[in-house]
Each structure stands twice: as C-alpha cells, then as structure tokens.
Image (spheres, rainbow, N blue to C red):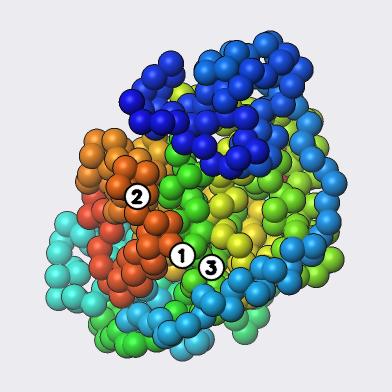
Amino acid sequence: MPEPLILNASDNVAILTEKGVAPAGHKIARAAIPAGGTVVKYEQIIDHTTEDIPEGAHVHRHNCAFGAHDREYHPGAGLDAARAAMGDRAAGELTFEGYRRPDGSVGTRNYLALVATVNCSATVIRRAAEEIRIEGALDAYPNVDGVVAFAHGSGCGMADSGPGWRALQRVLTGHAGHPNVGAALFVGLGCEVMQIARMKQELGAAARFHGLTIQDTGGTRRTIDAIKARIREMLPALNESRRETVPASSLRIGLQCGGSDGFSGVTANPALGIASDILAAHGASMVLSETPEIYGAERLLLDRAVTPAVADKLLERIRWWEEYTARNGASLDNNPSPGNKAGGLTTILEKSLGAVAKGGGAPLEAVLEYAEPITTPGLNFMDTPGYDPVSATGQIAGGAQLIVFTTGRGSAFGSKPAPTIKLATNDRLAQAMPDDMDLNCGDVLSRGVSLEDKGREIVALILATASGQTTKSEALGLGDNEFVPWQIGAVV
C-alpha cells in the first residue's frame, strides 16, 4: 500500500491515497491527538477533536467537530509577495479564436438567447426553442451554436426594488447582453414585477435587447409563433459572425468546484490555481465564488487584497452569510454535503482551504456582488451561494465566457451560454465518468505529474475551448436546466 500523503511537515494528519483503515481521500493521524486538540492540514486548523485519536487512526466526523477558526486578519500583508510571484507568469503571448462584439467584448460561443422575465413566460420560450430545433431552422446557419431558453421560477411575487430585484435584473440583462450571445429576445407575461420597459429604463443606453409579452401578443400559441418568427429574422445576421484571433486578456472565467473530495485541494484545485495565475498575469479576469465555501479560509484572500476597501467588502459578505444562515436556523458548517464527507472532507474549514486554491496566489483585485459585471483584470471574488447552478449563473451573468469546474465525486453539470470544462481530481472518477470529465488531474498523484505542468495543460484546454472546441457537457446537451438565479428576499 502506498505511503499516505503528507502535505506539510507541520500537519498532524496524512491523506490515504488508497483504501486502508478508511477510504482513499480520508485522513489518518500521523501521531496521537488528544481530545480537545486540533487537527492540522494545509498548515491550518481544520477540525477540533472530540475524543483521543491514536496514531494511524481514521480522523473524520466520528471523532472531530467544527469549531472556531483564526480571525486574526492582516489585509494586504501578502500583497507584495503575490505581485512578485505573478511577474514570472506573464511571459509569452496567449491568444484564442473568439467573436468580437460591437461593445468590445469577445464571445467564445455564438448563441441566440430567449430570456423569460417571469416564470409565466417560461413555457413559451422553451416551446419556441424546441420547435425551432425540431423544424431544423438552424441547419442553414453553421455559425450559430443554438437557440437557448433562459427560463426561471421568479420575476413576480417579489419586491419591486432592493437586492432581490437588482440581482434578478443583473442576471437577466447579463445573459441577454452576454458576450456569447449574438442576439437576444426578452419575453414576459405583461403584468409581472420584472417589467421589460423598466429594465430598459434602468439600463438606459446600455439596453440593446428587444422584447414582447404574452398578453400583448394574444396568448400562448400566438406568442410561440411570434418568437419563432423573430428567431428566423435574427438568424441570418447572427450567422455572419466569424471567429478571429484575440488576446487572452479578453477572457473572464468562472472558477467552480462541486462534489469535492479529499483530493480536490491536492490535485485539481491547486492545478487550476496555477492556470488561474497564468491567465490573470495575461490580463484575464478570473472569478472565484461560492462565499460559504471560502469560510474559514478567507484570510488567504484578505492577505492579498489590493486595497482596504476590497478587504472590507469581503469581510462584510462573510458577516452577512453568518447572520443569514443563523437567522434561518442553519450553520455554514452544514456544508460539506454528505457526498463531500463521504469523500473525506470533515468540516467547512477543510473544504474551504482546498476550494480557495482554485484562485491561485494572485492579488485579490475586486469583490463583486452577485451577477455584477466583471470589469477588473486579475483575480476577482463574486459573492454567491455554494450551490453550483446558482453560483455559475451569477458568474455567467457577470460576463464569464467559460466555467472551469473541479470535482472529486463526479458532477453532471453544464452551462449555457458559457460552456463548462470539468476537471476530475482522481483517476477513479476519470475512469468511471469518462463522458463527463474533460481532463483528469488524478495523475498528479498516480503518475507524479507536476502541478505546474497540469496547470499549463488546463490553460491549453481553456484556450482551445474558448476557440470552439466542444466540451463533454456540451456534447451531452447539458446546460439548459442549470440557469438558476439566486432568489434573495421574501416571496410575497
């Protein structure tokens, strides 16, 4: 049996790389740990022991518990070192083949989008998109990636102002105006809170979409036919789009993880972190998210905050989440999920330390609200839930043209209009779900591939995908049901 993996000399646990006293990915004690002691991994406290743990014993939920984490913050303390490390990452020129849009953005795909303003118009846009597909209307337009219907369960029964309204407005307009969308049509019922006319007024000159409502058009069937007629009108111009060589600085990439395991923070996440640093050094915007899944590791980001205001904004979001979960009778340690725990992750502190690795070591340039437009080059953080569809929806609404998604347990996730690249953290998963995984990072352990080399392999895959290479999730047709806007506030 291979020797357990020791990540740092100061750690008092090691990771099983094959099944032993516990499944692979789980932790064992390197030495006896007394009750009331701390479990250290990644040089950080991840658990508090509830009983004496002998050397070599399994360390997990049965003998550990979530507890307080280090709250001694020093914003910006590691900023100079982070900036110095990024200097070596900027060598060479990175480009891809993308679609230049009139507003200066660059798309990696070329979709026609139908966007429902309210749940009441979800059926008509889905039916129109499906009938267009069945009728073969796209066959004559090879440069169009498809007609995608963004339907959701909100848009009414909500306040007509405040954070919930603003978040949904950003999601809807962010998808309609997305770089991967060459043409868009908004469809409403007519009497909902999320009014098309008001969105146009709020956006002013930035509004570049068209819309119609079921009530004004004459009902469900007439609206479906009207949508189809508009689609057929828009397709010829959309098909004229052509790819051209553009710099990697045009990219905005969402960093995600889901179905994590004990290897996530050892293989795929740090390899993605290296890829993130390389692209950030070339001017791309890399977007780390999932606020509940950085909890306990926020200091690693605060150390690299470029200004006190950026640090303060991240801390404010952490406090909001503590209050939000508390008033709803939950705890941020309700995450990890059952699957995460089965994969070897014990507490949110452990999971967060691995999750933050996706963002590499770049300076933290900006903290964004949910679905806020991504405008700052380098590493960004967007406040989102940890639930993957909701989180990725916010990143895409902000302008992310690609999502890179690490998983250790396996995930059947895809997204539109921005495709998802999935990275497996271990060989077993890559072999078990070959039709879902785009790249195996398990060979970092099984074959000794360096994290540096794996990170550069991820960069090459990102650029190829941005240039049109089909992802596994695209080939499977995933992405239509993963558009899930975050519903903030009361449903009334």
The residue under label 2 is which amino acid type?
A: Gly
State yes or no: discs 1 and 3 in contact (Cβ < 8 Å).
yes
Q: Residue at x 19, y 69 (%)?
A: 138
Residue hosting label 3: 277
Local crowd at mark 1 within 10 Å, few (<14), some, or many (≥20)?
A: many
- Front position in the image: 121 or 66: 66
- Front position in the image: 2 or 462: 2
Q: Position of residue 453 (x, y in %)?
A: 38, 62
Local crowd at mark 2 within 10 Å, few (<14), some, or many (≥20)?
A: few
The residue under label 3 is which amino acid type?
A: Asp
Q: Is residue 172 visible?
A: no
Mark 3 to mark 2 CA distance (whole Å): 21 Å
Badge nearest the viewer, 2 or 1 = 2
Residue 260: give its label. none
Residue hosting label 1: 275
Badge nearest the viewer, 3 or 2 = 2
Q: Quadrant of the N terminus?
A: top left
Q: Position of residue 178 (x, y in %)?
A: 47, 71
Q: Position of residue 232 (x, y in %)?
A: 26, 74
Q: Position of residue 253 (x, y in %)?
A: 49, 65
Q: Quadrant of residue 45?
A: top right
The residue under label 1 is which amino acid type?
A: Ala
For marks 2 and 1, the one nearer the N-term is 1
Q: Quadrant of residue 459?
A: bottom left
Q: Residue at x 30, y 53 (%)?
A: 439
Q: Secondary structure at mark 1?
A: helix
Q: Is residue 307 visible?
A: yes
Residue hosting label 2: 448
